[in-house]
Image (tube, grey):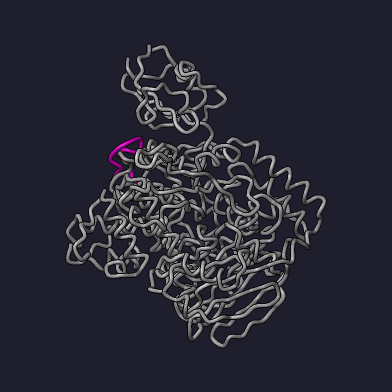
Amino acid sequence: MEITVKLYAGLSRYLPENAVEHAVKLDISPSETAFSILDRFNVPRESVHLVLLNGIYLNPAEREKPTFVAGDTLSVWPPVAGG
Amino acid sequence: MAWTKNVLRVNLTNGSITHEPLNMQWANDYLGQRGLATKYLSEEIDPKCDALSPENKLIMTTGPLTGTPASTAGRYSVVTKSPLTGAIACSNSGGYFGNEMKNAGWDMVILEGKSAAPVYLYIENDKAELIPADDLWGKSAWAADEMIHTKHQDPLVRIAVVGRAAEKGCLYSAVVNDLHRAAGRSGVGTVMASKNLKAVVLRGTKGVGGISDPARFLKVTEAGKKVLADNEVTGQGLPALGTQVLMNIINEVGALPTHNHRDVQFDGAGKISGEAMLEIRPGDGKANLTTNGACFSCTIACQRISTVDKTHFTVKDKPEYQGNSGGLEFENAWSLGTDCGVDDLDAVTFSNFLCNEDAVDPISLGATIAAAMELFEEGAITVEDTGGMELKFGSAEALVWATEVTVRGEGFGKDLGLGSKRLCEKYGRPELSMTVKNQEFPAYDPRGMQGMGLAYATSNRGACHLRGYTAASEIMGIPEKTDPLVTDGKPGLVKAFQDATAVVDSAGLCVFTTFAWTLEDIAPQIDAACEGDWSAERCLEVGERIWNMEREFNLAAGLTGKDDTLPKRLLKDAAKTGPAKGRTNDLHQMLPEYYALRGWTPDGIPTDATRSRLGL
C-alpha cells in the first residue's frame, strides 16, 4: 500500500532527491512500523522526536507497531519547539 | 546585578525627574519586572482611567537577573494600562535595552503625566534629562533611532522608540528597541506616544554589581547554560529554524488558524515555513534566512536575520529595504501570512520589516487585516472604503498595502489601526472579530488545541500565547505530552504554565528557556543573585500572587468573568479539516474547574481566602 512520508526541519536531509515539499510517496507492507519506515531513510532514532500519523501524535510505543492503512501520512520532526 | 534598588520617576507634565529607592517589601513579594511593575501600577493609577489620558502611567522595568550573565538575562517589559483591551498590559522584549537600563543603575523607569510637546528621555547613568523631539515626531522608529544615534554621536546608546503608527493612534502600536526587538502587544507604544514621549535613550556604564553570592551565582548560571546547550530544542532546534519550525507542525495537527479562523489548515503553509526560509530562491540566488542572532546574554539565539528577494515587487525599487533585517518569527509569519491566506514569503517578510520600522504589533496587525479581508469578502467593506484596493484573502499586494497604510496611519489604515474588534463593530459584523478582551489571537486554533483555548480566554492581557503556553505540552511534549483534543487536565496545566511564566518574566529571563529549564533550574539562579531564600516553591507562590494581582487590576478596571470567553466561531463552528475536524473548543468544560483551582468564585473573582493566602 502507498503512504506519504514527510521529514521536516533537520530530518529533511534524509529525504531522497525526488522529494517535493518535504514529502515522498512510499509503498509499504502492512507489517511495517513508523520506525521501520524511518530506518529505510536512515533516520537515526535518537533524532526522532515528534511523530504524527495523519496529524495525530504517535506515542513512542505505537512507533514500533504496524498502524498504517493506505493513504496515511507519516510526518516526523527532530526535537523542536517555538512560540 | 540583582536589584539596583533604584527607581527613576519622570513626570512628563512638569518635567520633574526624581530618584527613589525601590520598595523592597514589594520586591520580595513580586520579584521584579512584570510582577513588581504591575504592583507599582496597581498602587499608583485608577484602573478605570482612560489608558490614553495623562492619568495612565507607563513603566519600563527590568528583573533582578536582567543584565547578569544568566542566559537570556536581557529582558525588560513595558507595563501600563492597555488602550486596546482596557486591561493590564505587560509587553516583554529582548535585545540590549534592558541590560543597558540595569547598567545605568535603574530597576525601573516610571513615566507619568503628558508632555506639552514631543520629547525624548535621555538617561546616562544617574543623569536623566528630557530633550525636545519635535524633529523626531512624524518619523518612523528606524529613522528616529538613526537620528538619535547621530545626534549623540554614540553608537552604544540603546534606544526604545515608537513609530508613526503610535503617533496616529493605532491601538496596537509597539515600543521597538534595538531596531528589531519589540515590546509588542496590547498597544504599549500607543500609550507612550499619547504622552508625547518619542523615545527612551539609555547609556549605562556602571557594570554588574550587587549579586548576593557571586561565586554560587556563576556556578549555577553556568550549570543552567549547560542544560540549555545540551537540550536538543534550545541547543539545536531553535538556533537552526527559530520559532518558524512550528508552521508545518501546527498546520499538520490542524490548529493553524487560516482566513480569520474560517479554516484550521493552510495549503500554503509550507511556502512560508521555517524550512522555506532556508531554500535558495530563484530571483537573487539567496535564501530568505541569512543567519540567526541573539539577544543580550542569550545562549539560545533564536532570532532570524533575513532579506527580501531584491527582484520582488515589494523592494525592487526600494534599496533601503534590500539589506538584512529582523526576519519572521512564527507568530508574524502566521498573522501576516496564514491568517490572511498569503503564501508569498517575500511579501510576508517585507510586511514584517514595516512592522518593525514603525513599531506595530504584527500579530494584531495581521489578524486585523485578516478580519478586514473577511469583511471585504462578505461585502461589509467595499472598494469605496479602501480607496480602490481589493482586500481579498491571498492577495500579497493587499497585505502589503494594508500594512503600509496602517503603520503610517493613512486613510483606511486608520480603521485598521482600531484593531479587529472595533473594526468589525464599525462595519456591522462584530462576530467576525477573533479576539479575547479586544486583543487579537496568536497562531493556535483553540478547536485543535483545547488548552490554548482556556489559556486565551483567561489571559490577563487578552488573547495571548505567552501567558500560558500549553502548546508546549499539547504539541511538543514539554514537559510532558498531553492530547491537544482532550480537555481533561487542561485547567491545571493552564494554571501551572501561567504561574510559572509569571516568575520567568518577573526574573528578567526569556520564556523560551522553559523548553529546557524548569523552576528547579531557575530558582537557584534567582536565589544566588537575590537576598533572601528563593526556592522553587516560593517562586511558584510569587507567580500565583502576580497572576491574581493582574486579575484584581482587571476586575477593578471593569472587566468580569464574562470576558473570559472565546469568539462564537470557535465555540460553535466546528473545524472543517484535520485531526480536529468536527470539534469546537469546549471552554465550558474547563472554565469552572480553572476558577476552582485558582480559588476564585464561580464568577471568576478571587475569594477572600485566596486573597488572604496570597497576601493580596
Quadrant of the frame with the N terminus of chain B: bottom right
Magenta highlight on residue B320: no
> Where are the magenta residues, as a range?
B574-585
Closer-to-camera residue (B145/B566): B145
Q: Is residue B112 above or below residue B587?
A: below
Which x, y percent locates residue B60? 58, 68
Q: Main secondary structure of the magenta part?
A: loop
Instruction: List the single residue furthest toward the bottom.
Output: B14
Which x, y percent locates residue B54? 49, 82
Closer-to-camera residue (B128/A64): B128
Q: At 41% across and 58% down in the image, what residue appears?
A: B320
Q: Is residue B137 left or right of residue B537?
A: left
Q: At 41% across and 74% down in the image, what residue appears?
A: B138
Q: Is residue A74 above or below residue B98?
A: above
Magenta highlight on residue B583: yes
Answer with the quarter of the image where residue B378 lies. Answer: bottom left
Q: At 55% across and 53% down in the image, what residue appears?
A: B498
Instruction: Examine the rendering and report whether any part of residue A17 can be seen.
Output: yes
Instruction: Examine the rendering and report whether any part of residue B588 can be seen.
Output: no
Which x, y percent locates residue B175? 50, 65
Q: Is residue B14 left or right of residue B414?
A: right
Which x, y percent locates residue B343? 32, 44
